[in-house]
Image (spheres, rainbow, N blue to C red):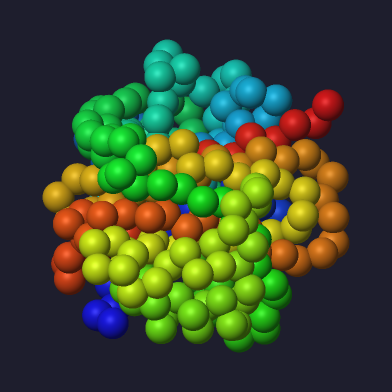
């Protein structure tokens, strides 16, 4: 099949580990910084993940104009008057304290956040004839796990064009729907005459639950907004959880880009 550019924009934001300045002792250079109006630098970027703790906004992940990823913690001290309106896909301007810590993604301290442009993508018609989302589980397999680890987000996406490709996934991973539906024999040559499957998966523990909140198309970009609900306590097992999205072939062409945006809701109660 033609391989598609995969733009992955999801990530667990509760990061731990060592942070430091670079070897020269200065902060990571940030080409998006702007010191003309204030002593504090500013950064403009697209919100790709929003992290909530007990339904309170906790942190956001943005990609700046150089496509570099940054995480900013959002607490009560941050001047953010429109935080209740924030959505993935929004373009924001962040005034920050200046020091950018060398984790990946890099981490900074936000002082003020302004929403510049709220996302304007139109949600694809939710008519079941247009697309259907099937939550799936799959067996662990080392080479697929290593493939997921090749990106920091642990999410993989693919477009399945035909029955032989789907059969290979079934053989390798043994997809099982997350609810009572039998997909054995469902995706045959007849199905793939007018449809394709979008496969989105994440290696995780058995604790979180996932849902596709939105499925959007804007030009050649198709974006799935995933929501994770979990608790602070995690199990140690590793499983694959994800989705098969049945989409009409007319939605997908050789230039289609599959993107993901991410909402993470952690409960401490």
Foreground of the two, 194 or 200? 194
Side of 179 where 221 appears, left or right = left
Residue 166 in the image: x percent, y percent? 45, 76
Is the residue 84 above or below the residue 70 in the image? above
Residue 199: x and y, percent? 45, 63
Q: Can residue 48 be seen in this view?
A: no
Determine whether 130 is above or below 145 in the image: above
Q: Which residue is drawn at 69% across and 59% down?
A: 204
Q: In which quarter of the image is residue 165?
A: bottom left
Q: Can residue 254 be seen in this view?
A: yes
Classify the position of the C terminus by image quarter.
Answer: top right
Residue situated in front as seen by the camera: 87 or 209 = 209
Count the marks: 0
| 5 relative to 95 in the view: left or right | left
* Residue 255 occupies quadrant: bottom left
Q: Position of residue 254 (x, y in %)?
A: 17, 71
Could you say where residue 241 lies in the image, as x and y percent from the top left? 63, 58
Would residue 59 be found to the left or right of residue 85 on screen? right
Point 43% across, 67% down: residue: 187
Q: What is the quadrant of the N terminus in the image?
A: bottom left
**Residue 149 in the figure: left or right of residue 67:** right
Which residue corresponds to the image point at 60% horizontal and 52% vertical from the top-left? 181
């Amino acid at each position: 099949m033609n391989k598609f550019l995969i733009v992955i924009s999801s990530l667990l934001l509760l990061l731990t580990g060592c942070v430091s300045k670079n070897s020269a002792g200065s902060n990571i250079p940030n080409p998006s910084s702007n010191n003309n109006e204030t002593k504090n630098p500013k950064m403009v970027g697209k919100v790709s993940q929003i992290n909530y703790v007990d339904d309170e906004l906790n942190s956001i992940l943005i990609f700046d104009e150089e496509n570099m990823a940054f995480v900013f913690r959002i607490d009560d001290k941050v001047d953010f008057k429109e935080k209740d309106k924030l959505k993935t896909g929004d373009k924001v301007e962040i005034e920050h304290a200046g020091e950018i810590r060398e984790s990946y993604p890099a981490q900074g301290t936000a002082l003020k956040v302004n929403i510049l442009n709220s996302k304007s993508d139109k949600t694809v018609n939710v008519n079941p004839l247009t697309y259907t989302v099937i939550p799936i589980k799959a067996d662990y397999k080392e080479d697929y796990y290593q493939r997921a680890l090749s990106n920091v987000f642990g999410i993989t996406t693919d477009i399945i064009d035909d029955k032989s490709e789907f059969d290979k996934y079934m053989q390798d991973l043994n997809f099982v729907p997350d609810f009572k539906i039998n997909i054995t024999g469902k995706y045959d040559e007849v199905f793939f005459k007018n449809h394709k499957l979008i496969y989105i998966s994440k290696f995780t523990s058995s604790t979180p639950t996932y849902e596709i909140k939105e499925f959007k198309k804007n030009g050649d970009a198709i974006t799935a907004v995933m929501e994770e609900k979990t608790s602070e306590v995690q199990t140690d097992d590793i499983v694959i959880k994800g989705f098969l999205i049945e989409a009409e072939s007319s939605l997908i062409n050789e230039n289609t880009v599959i993107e993901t945006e991410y909402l993470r809701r952690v409960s401490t109660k």
